Every structure is written in C-alpha cells, then in structure tokens.
Amino acid sequence: MRRDEGDKKEKSIKINRKVGVSTREVVWKRNKTVLWYYPASKKVYRTPLFLVYSLINEAYILDLAPGMSMIETFTDKGYDVYLLDFGRPGYEDKDVSLDDYIMSYIKTGVDRALRHAQTMEMSMVGYCLGGTLAVIYTAIINESIKNLILFAPPLDFSSYDVFPNWFQVLKNDSSSVDQLLNDYGMIPSKFINTGLRLATSPFTISSKLASLTPSRSEKTNVKRQLVNEWLSSHIPFSALTLRQLMDDLGGKNKLMENKLKIQGKTVYLSNLKANLLVISTTDDLIVPEKLTYPIMNKVSSIDKTYKRVKGGHISLALKGELPYFMEKWLHDRSISVNET
C-alpha cells in the first residue's frame, strides 16, 4: 500500500468515529454537569443504576462504542441507567469545591434520578475518582443507596505518593499551586495528563494499549483510536477541588481517618451501610489495590464483597460484558419489575 493510500484509509477511520451512541435523554443540568438517562432495552429491574465517573477524564468512556460500552451492557441486562456527567469545567467554575461536587451535584442528581425513576432507592456505581466521590456521598447520605459498586476507587493514601507527584509537576511547570489558584483558578488539562504519566512512570495506560497486537480489522483499529484519544483527553480541573483532594485526601488521608468534612459535616465511613461490592484489577497502575482494599474494614455494611480481577484501570469499562460475579451480585440485590 502506498503512503497516500494509507493516509486516506486513516482519514476515513477518523471520519467514521462515534462515541456515546446509546439512546439517552437529559434529566437535569447544572452548569457543565448533565444527568443523562439511558432506558433499559427491555426493563427487568425496578432498581436503577446511578453512575458517577471521575473528574479527570470525560465520562464517555462508559459508553465508548457498541460492544465497548458499560452503559450498553447494563441497559441490555434490563437496568435503567443514570449517568452523572460532570462535563468540562471552565474558568467560571474555578470556585467549585469538593463540597459542591458532593452536595450540589451528586446529591441533587440522585434526587432528580429518584424522582424520574419513581423509586425510593437505587444502586450507585462509582468508577475511579467517581468511586471516591460515591463513598463520601454514601457515607453522608445513604438512605437512598441500596447497593454501592466501586471500580478501583482511590481511597487510602497512607502509603501512596501520586498526589505529591502531581504537586511537583505543577510546581515545575508553573510557579506554584497558589499562583495557579490566584491567577488562573483552573488546572489546565495538560498538567493533569503530565501528572498521571509521572505517577505511573515508567509505565502508562497508553503504553500498555500500544503494546497490543495490531489488528487487521478496521473496526478494532477504530476502537483502539477511540481509547487512545480518550486517554489523552484529560479535562481542566478546579484548582480548589484539586487542592482539597491533594491536601485532605492525599496528604492527610482524612477520609480514611474519619476527619474529612463536607459542608461542616464529618464523613464517617462507618455510616456507610449499603450492600457493597468493591472491584480492583491486577494491572492497575493508576489505582493499585492498596488504595482500595482498606475500605472493607472501615464500613458498617453487613453485605460486602471484594473482588480482584485480571485487567487494567479501564479494562472493565471496555469489555462489553459484565463479569459473572458482578452480574449475579447485582441481580440478587435488585428488585425485579415482577416483584410486589
């Protein structure tokens, strides 16, 4: 194949890319945040799912493409799905705090989803940093969360130094965190990307993905491109929220020490009583198991399960199917439409 022919083929792939193709509608919006509703293909369960994704990347990774969509998998199994998409913050969002994300966005989003679904309780699914937010929320307000599923949430920073590394990146690339706060208010996406690469050096998710055997299938190569683009599409971050995460969670480990305060209210992990499923993966370089497992001994959940499965940080979002243990766990704890 001549070079120009290869370029034309590559260009055609880019033109045909689509992400977030599952049927959805807007339930509620505030600033950049959107609560999306994805109806079940054929409704089997009355207990809906409420998905909370990270603040670092865009949420479309959960609905990347047909056959590579966690949302599609859930709706095909008969669950109504709500996704809280925090969007891409701008300079006008520089004063958005961790407290705001928990109480103004997640709490309000849950309330709107419950009203829309006409139910009193739901299952919450938190992915990565979204799992951290879900834990904080559920420990404060847990009466409406029947089941809590966490995918690789960073929680215990007693022996992990990724956040200090991020601070170092910020200081090396600019003058100081304080100057960024005062002058800009938002952490540019390139700093987030650089910080994650430093934290996982010498390995990165991108390098793992690049090492996969090339495929002759155009469909597979399109999916590979979609993942690569998502991996590099970190979004701006409220410097106020980042400082709280780095200082309160990363530096002082306040969440695990029951010292974190949200709007003046202390977050006690022992208040978390929902049925709990926590999942980590063997090759996760962003959130290793030691950041996740300790929550199992902190919560008051009587029904709690921990699973470690083979894969990397985003592999479960891309499989296009649920692990059997998770499918059964959720099935057993969700109310079917046939139950009275």
Image (tube, helix red, strand yellow):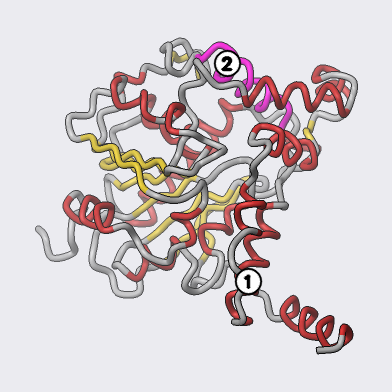
Q: Residue at 28% of width from left, 33% of height from top? A: 143
Look at mark 1 in the image and give the residue it sits on. 214
User: In the picture provided, is 327 more to the left or to the right than 28?
Assistant: left
Vertically, is 181 above or below 74? above
How far is disc 2 from disc 1 in space, using C-alphas?
43 Å
Magenta region: 237-253
Q: Quadrant of the C terminus?
A: bottom left
Query: Residue 217 is drawn in which quadrant?
Result: bottom right
Q: Earlier in the sequence, mark 2 or mark 1?
A: 1
User: In the picture provided, is 296 more to the left or to the right than 116?
Assistant: left
Check disc 2 and report its element: helix, strand or loop.
helix
State the count of labels: 2
Q: Quadrant of the N terminus?
A: bottom right
Q: Residues within 10 Å of mark 2 (few under 14, many from 20)?
A: some
Q: Picture coordinates of residue 278 (x, y %)?
A: 34, 38
Q: Nearer the viewer, residue 205 or 294?
A: 205
Q: Residue at 60% of width from left, 76% of height from top? A: 215
Q: Nearer the viewer, residue 229 or 182?
A: 229
Q: Residue at 89% of width from left, 86% of height from top? A: 4
Vertically, is 229 above or below 114? below
Q: Picture coordinates of residue 164 (x, y %)?
A: 68, 20
Residue type at numbered disc 1 = Pro
Residue type at numbered disc 2 = Asp
Look at mark 2 in the image and give the residue it sits on. 248
